[in-house]
Image (cartoon, rainbow, N blue to C red):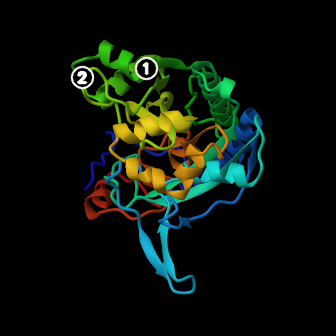
Amino acid sequence: MHSSFIPAGYRSILDAFDTQIAIGLVKRVFADALAEKLNLHRVSAPLFVDPNSGLNDNLNGVERPVSFDIPAVGQKGEIVHSLAKWKRMALYRYHFRPGKGLYTDMNAIRRDEILSNIHSVYVDQWDWEKVITKEERTVSYLQETVRGIMAAVCETAAVLRDNYPALPCKPEKEVTFITSQELEDRYPDLTAKERENEITKIHKTVFIMQIGGKLRSGKPHDGRAPDYDDWKLNGDLLLWNETLGAALEISSMGIRVDSTSMREQLICAGAEERAALPFHKMLLDGVLPLTIGGGIGQSRLCMLLLGKAHIGEVQASLWDEETRRVCEDAGVLLL
């Protein structure tokens, strides 16, 4: 399935060569800026995990992870959807202390993704996680962290414009915070994605908080796995994409569940059986540290800052015949 389109009159500002050089620049500059703002250290990360460990991200609970047998090990491996839970385990195993965190280059395969201008079956993120104290499990700490991420985004954009003055993207550094319920109350007749577009078109940089639980309409703003984000202390960071005329989600993040919120959310999601998995048992027993973390889309940030219309212009993936035709007809080069 696909829903790709190329805006009328679109032409890439950078050619294929400069695009590749600029992608490398974005990835280097942003990683260093993010590490400095949030006090993070780079670590190595797995491409696949033990499917019985409970470490893989279940996303919305319906996506099928790619798995394969490993004869030399005598078991199967499962390609990660994200490292949401693995990172918390790593902080424990590597003895990180409050105030310090890690980040990594995460590569994943999401085979059931619906292809579009901003969705691919290949996912690349800066996955990060940081140890916090009980006193820091607050909305104000969450917002402070979001502002740090946006400072890193804006610094990266400035370096990019210095090297490529023709690039027009100048993200709004000031973040507008709103809860998913406040957003629904403001636009009750719109869908969740339409609400995101309306609020982001106005404010340019928006963080929608409290995603996962049902709103007064009876529906959640968006799906969230019940066993990593605390649904009362999480959110999505959206930036206005002028090229596509739509909101672009750059990051899904949040303060992670403690034992109390995970029990509540597992019950709410009808997933109580996960409590028996190794990761979940460690969390419920209070072994794992309290953390905040998230993922920041590498290709999405690149396409935003480089003014690209399709994510396939900044990452190499596989595309259906119709997407290839639409892009070819518009003179868009898919990597």
Vertical comparison of 186 with 120: above or below: above
Which image quarter: residue 221? top left
Circle 2 — which element?
loop
Q: Residue placed farthest to the left in the image?
A: 189
In the image, residue 132 lies at what x, y percent? 69, 33
**For the point 67% across and 42% down, which residue is it?**
289
In the image, residue 119 lies at what x, y percent? 39, 50
- Using residue 168 as the reference point, say whether residue 200 is left or right of it: left
In the image, residue 329 lies at what x, y percent? 30, 55
In this rendering, does residue 251 appear at all?
Answer: no
Q: Amino acid at mark 2?
A: Ser
Which residue does the numbered mark 1 point to in the structure image? 179
Give the quadrant of the N terminus.
bottom left
Q: Nearer the viewer, residue 303 or 83?
A: 83
- Mark 1–mark 2 Cα distance, whole angstroms, equals 14 Å
**For the point 64% across and 45% down, which residue is it?**
128
In this rendering, does residue 123 appear at all?
Answer: yes
Vertical comparison of 229 with 331: above or below: above
Q: Residues within 10 Å of mark 2 (few under 14, many from 20)?
A: few
Label of residue 217 in the image: 2
Q: Are marks 1 and 2 in contact (CB under 8 Å)?
A: no
Circle 1 — which element?
strand
**For the point 29% across and 54% down, which residue is it?**
326
- Using residue 208 as the reference point, say whether residue 64 is left or right of it: left
Q: Amino acid at mark 1?
A: Thr
